[in-house]
Amino acid sequence: MRLIQFLIFAGIVSLYIGFSAVQGYLLHSTRGPGYRSAGWVMVFAYAILIWLPTSAFILTLTWLPLSLRIIAVISGITTTALVTSRPEWIPPMVWTRAFNRSYLGITMVLVALASMIPFLPEPNVGALTLGLAASMAGLSAMRDITTQF
């Protein structure tokens, strides 16, 4: 696997795990006595519009070995299950905003690298736009982290 393929794979998988964590958070939030039934619409909409299509997209990446694609999807399903159940053996700091912002910042750096490296030999407006947006999101997340410490 070339460097660019590795960076693209790392960016896609880290975004997918983030999407899976959001799906788990939405499912976890349905476990309350005062939860409204309208919230289930959000859970299903997110699953149908974001999480399931992203899972299918990863499975269709033919340039990746099948084993890596399956591991990526299983990692996402596992992330959703863990965030939904929030087992006690996972340190409480994982559920904090600072941890989530750190994860977002690192993910955006990976996406920016995966987008910007192909831009260097062959200029591409789409890659440049995605790379710049990811860079700004990553810097914003990192800025929020540094103010918390």
Image: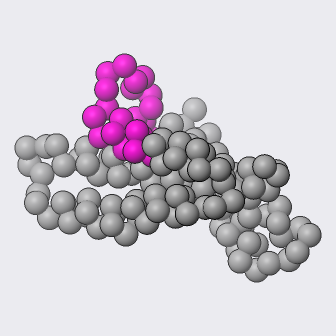
Report the quarter where the C terminus lies: top right
Q: Residue 146 sits in which quadrant?
A: top right
In front: 131, or 60? 60
Q: Residue 81 sits in which quadrant?
A: top left
Q: Which residue, as the protein is rendered here, is positioned at the far front?
A: 66
Percent position of residue 52, x then y: 39, 61
Residue at x 67% of width, y 69% of height: 130
Residue 31, relative to residue 125: is it above or below?
above
Residue at x 55% of width, y 63% of height: 60
Q: Which residue, as the protein is rendered here, is positioned at the far right?
A: 121
| 8 relative to 95 in the view: left or right | right
Tell me if residue 81 is in the magenta stretch: yes
Q: Which residue, as the protein is rendered here, is positioned at the far bottom?
A: 125
Residue 132, relative to residue 55: is it above or below?
below
In front: 77, or 141? 77
The answer to whether residue 46 shows anywhere in this view is yes
Residue at x 82% of width, y 66% of height: 118
Task: Provide the residue span drawn in magenta.
Answer: 76-98
Q: Which secondary structure is most common in the magenta stretch?
A: helix
